[in-house]
Amino acid sequence: YRLDGASLWVAQNGQPVLTRHYGGYSDATRIPIASASKWVSALVLARLVERGTLRWDSTVGEWWPTVAADKRNITLAQLFSHASGLPVDSLGCTVNPLSTLQACAAQFLSGPLVSPPGTAFAYGGSPSMQVAGAMAERATGQSWEALFVRELVVPLGITSMDYGFTSTAPGPVSTGNPFIGGGVRSTLADYRKLMAMWQADGVIREGPFAGQRYLVSSTIRAMQRDHAAGTERLEVPSSVALYPGWGYGFGFWILPTTRAGAPVIESSPGAFGFQGWVDGAAGIAGVFMVQDAN
């Protein structure tokens, strides 16, 4: 397949059982992870909800009082579960480094809706998740980058993850317009910290804060609910459509297993092949790292 390399990490029942690099990949390899970014960004928002800074039912109208009436009642939950009614067919300003997160969100909020908020599921997330990120900035008075560092990088012991998107520059890349739903770069080691924490139901597994709680169980339960339930299915990736009974949490897919009555697989695959997942029935968490040509 002419790939530069690949990496795989697997843990079972909370214990790492495999960490392996193939081809030219190593511990230092960092690549764009596309839509696997959604789970990352959702965790930042979840921490703000736990702080009481935001609520999952916080509305666009609370933070943009002059927004058009049809968008005023869009909630944070809808923005991060593809049910906001905002369009999904263009990256638009999300990949414009000369824009800002606030300007980009305002641009998306000034356009038309494709469906009434809360009525339809349309996977994509560029506009809706940019608006969610901008909402967090308005609620806190801090940049998304600062929130990302405070709420995820520091507590989870992250060392190489950023919103540098397709940049190949070393070190953390700073941007005033982070691509909330698809712009993260990560190493295998950094993303596995998220999956290990999730498998441990919110307890940090490694780093300086190992053993401490990152998210309370009730927050995780709220994120794990199927927020696509009861909506019209407008845009669904063909790979997901293969799983009857699929759902969507906040930033990740919910896929049923073949084990009767068993927990589901939670997964956040990116367009270039990167994927993190937690299989509750098998007690397995994993990260597969690769960058292909989509």
Image (cartoon, rainbow, N blue to C red):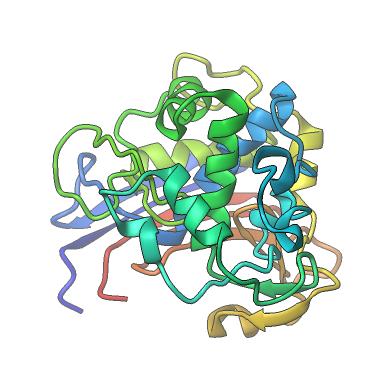
Where, quadrant-wise, is the C terminus in this rendering?
bottom left
Between 89 and 162, the one lying in front of the other is 89
Residue 49 is left or right of residue 236, and the answer is: right
Q: How many marks?
A: 0
Residue 49 vertical placement versus 165 (above, below): above
Q: Residue at x 39, y 69 (%)?
A: 271
Q: Residue at x 77, y 71 (%)?
A: 116
Residue 189 vertical placement versus 244 (above, below): above
Q: Residue at x 60, y 18 (%)?
A: 211
- The x and y percentages for residue 263 are 77, 58
- The x and y percentages for residue 71 are 71, 59
- Quadrant of residue 202 within the rendered picture: top right
Q: Residue at x 62, y 17 (%)?
A: 212
Q: Residue furthest top?
A: 208
Where, quadrant-wise, is the N terminus in this rendering?
bottom left
Residue 15 vertical placement versus 96 (above, below): above
Answer whether residue 38 is visible to the viewer in this image: no
Q: Residue furthest front?
A: 66
- The x and y percentages for residue 131 are 56, 50
Answer whether residue 162 is visible to the viewer in this image: yes
Residue 246 is left or right of residue 284, and the answer is: right
Residue 95 is left or right of residue 152, and the answer is: left
- The x and y percentages for residue 55 are 76, 36
